């Protein structure tokens, strides 16, 4: 089980790294070809597309995740689930997406002058039409333990965005429209790869009774997904609304580095969740102990990686961006901690998602968090600017974590080791922040800065290996011996 989780996590992370690579490649391109005010429009369209994709598929990716665990015994049942959920998602995306676009056409062009004109929001609709289906298909692949096919779909999708941007933004000089068109076409390529790579599983016959059951479960989760997406993108939208589009680019640069963390968290969650659900079914003390081991080991990885991203944020921004964005490292540090805390929530809400009768409780968690984000953003952004917006986002994640933990205790017998999980985060993050502050404010020689940071990264990696091996009761010598034997067998073959 441990090896399968690790292998799957690496594969899912490779797909997420392609998204991060895409953002790294596009950052210098966009900062040179787009105006800072264009980032306000770009952030609005991306945020709107993320929200619309869940509305268009009516939350069916959540239903696909939960129901896949009940349909793993027989190939015929799996294909029946695939056909039912994909037919339902395609139908809902087409119908709701078309109605949404017609509604946008009826609105005045400049109804949202401080955010984006209505024609720009059409790109969000085009993106969400395909992305809603891709999310459902990706969830089916993850829960049926097909990480290679999942990676193929999402890597193809993310990589396509780079040449599309080069063609439309650089060669054709379409600037903002070129960037938006590239973004809107990207998921259509992912959907095409999804269908072509899973022809052996796709059976376009739907079970109406199963579709009704899927829809009922999805509708209960849909408000939660809407609020969750709003929580994810609201900080960038609020920067545009409260501070102006000229500040969005600065916040985007800082959040771009931090955005690697939700990718890592998602990769770990994708690989661990099927095993967590299978242990929940056993409902034994030993099964719950294994779940706790998985969660603490995962949070140790999240803590180590996030701390190193925060530590090196200053140098990375200096390397990739112009002078105007260099001080955005403070935003990166605050948002990295925010996403690390959200990594704990990924495990806690498994209790609520597993209990089909209590899934609507998640609405209160995400809804209250969104209200807190808006309220704190209005207060802090006016006083501290962009940094205040990042502080508001961090406060919201702390509240989200607390409420999720309290609700998780009410719906399932599993008790998460929250103290140990928080300890795993701060074991790495506190020393990294102290070193970062020392390097920035004391202003030592450059060789001392780089040497101390490299030493911290090396020591944190070693500490991670030791802690995970102790937590999972894995012998390091056994791991080395296994890898050596595997390499010898492959070499002989």
Image (tube, rainbow, N blue to C red):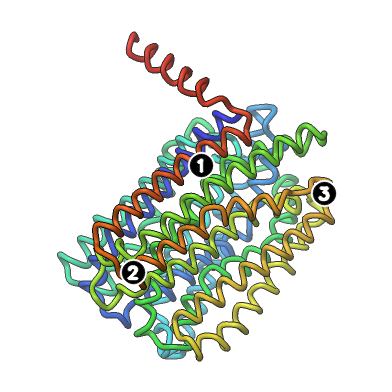
Secondary structure found at label 2: helix
Residue at 64% across, 67% down: 398
> Callout 2: few (<14), some (14-19), or many (20+) C-alpha neighbours within 10 Å?
many
Residue 405: percent from left, percent from top: 74, 59
Q: According to the image, label 3 marks what residue?
A: 412
Residue 248: percent from left, percent from top: 39, 79
The answer to which quarter of the image holds residue 116 is: bottom left
Residue at 53% across, 50% down: 302
Q: CA distance from mark 2 to mark 3?
A: 44 Å
Residue 249: percent from left, percent from top: 35, 76
Q: Quadrant of the N terminus?
A: top right
Secondary structure found at label 1: helix
Q: With respect to residue 329, does 426 lie above or below?
A: above
Relative to residue 36, is residue 150 drawn left or right?
Answer: right
Nearest the viewer among 336 and 429 is 429
Q: According to the image, label 2 marks what residue?
A: 180
Q: According to the image, label 1 marks what residue?
A: 464
Q: Which mark sits nearer the N-terminus, 2 or 1? A: 2
Numbered disc in front, either 2 or 1 = 1
Relative to residue 336, is residue 32 drawn left or right?
Answer: left
């Amino acid at each position: 089980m441990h090896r399968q989780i690790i292998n799957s996590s690496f594969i899912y992370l490779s797909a997420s790294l392609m998204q991060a690579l895409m953002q790294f490649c596009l950052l210098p391109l966009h900062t040179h070809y787009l105006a800072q005010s264009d980032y306000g429009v770009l952030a609005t369209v991306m945020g709107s597309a993320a929200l619309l994709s869940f509305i268009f598929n009516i939350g069916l990716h959540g239903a696909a995740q939960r129901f896949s665990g009940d349909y793993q015994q027989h190939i015929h049942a799996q294909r029946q689930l695939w056909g039912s959920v994909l037919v339902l998602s395609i139908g809902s995306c087409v119908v709701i997406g078309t109605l949404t676009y017609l509604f946008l056409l009826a609105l005045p062009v400049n109804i949202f002058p401080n955010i984006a004109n209505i024609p720009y929001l059409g790109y969000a609709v085009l993106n969400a039409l395909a992305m809603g289906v891709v999310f459902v298909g990706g969830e089916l692949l993850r829960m049926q333990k097909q990480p290679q096919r999942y990676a193929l779909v999402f890597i193809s999708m993310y990589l396509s965005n780079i040449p599309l941007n080069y063609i439309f933004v650089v060669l054709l000089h379409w600037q903002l429209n070129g960037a938006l068109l590239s973004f809107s076409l990207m998921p259509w390529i992912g959907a095409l790869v999804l269908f072509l790579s899973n022809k052996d599983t796709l059976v376009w016959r739907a079970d109406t009774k199963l579709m009704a059951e899927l829809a009922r479960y999805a509708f209960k989760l849909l408000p939660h997904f809407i609020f969750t997406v709003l929580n994810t993108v609201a900080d960038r939208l609020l920067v545009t609304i409260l501070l102006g589009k000229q500040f969005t680019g600065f916040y985007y640069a800082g959040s771009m580095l931090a955005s690697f963390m939700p990718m890592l968290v998602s990769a770990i969650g994708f690989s661990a969740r099927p095993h967590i659900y299978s242990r929940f079914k056993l409902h034994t003390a030993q099964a719950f102990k294994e779940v706790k081991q998985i969660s603490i080991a995962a949070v140790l990885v999240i803590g180590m990686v996030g701390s190193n991203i925060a530590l090196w944020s200053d140098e990375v921004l200096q390397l990739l961006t112009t002078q105007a964005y260099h001080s955005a490292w403070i935003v990166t540090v605050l948002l990295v901690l925010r996403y690390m805390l959200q990594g704990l929530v990924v495990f806690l809400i498994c209790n609520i998602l597993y209990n089909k009768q209590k899934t609507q409780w998640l609405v209160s968690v995400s809804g209250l968090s969104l209200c807190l984000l808006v309220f704190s953003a209005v207060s802090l952004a006016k006083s501290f600017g962009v940094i205040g917006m990042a502080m508001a986002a961090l406060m919201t994640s702390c509240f989200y974590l607390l409420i999720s933990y309290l609700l998780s205790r009410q719906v399932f017998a599993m008790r998460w080791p929250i103290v140990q999980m928080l300890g795993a985060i701060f074991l790495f993050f506190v020393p990294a922040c102290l070193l970062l502050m020392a390097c920035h404010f004391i202003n030592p020689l450059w060789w001392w800065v780089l040497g101390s940071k490299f030493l911290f990264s090396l020591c944190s990696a070693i500490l991670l290996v030791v802690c995970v091996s102790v937590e999972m009761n894995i012998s390091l010598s056994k791991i080395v011996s296994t890898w050596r034997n595997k390499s010898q067998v492959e070499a002989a073959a």
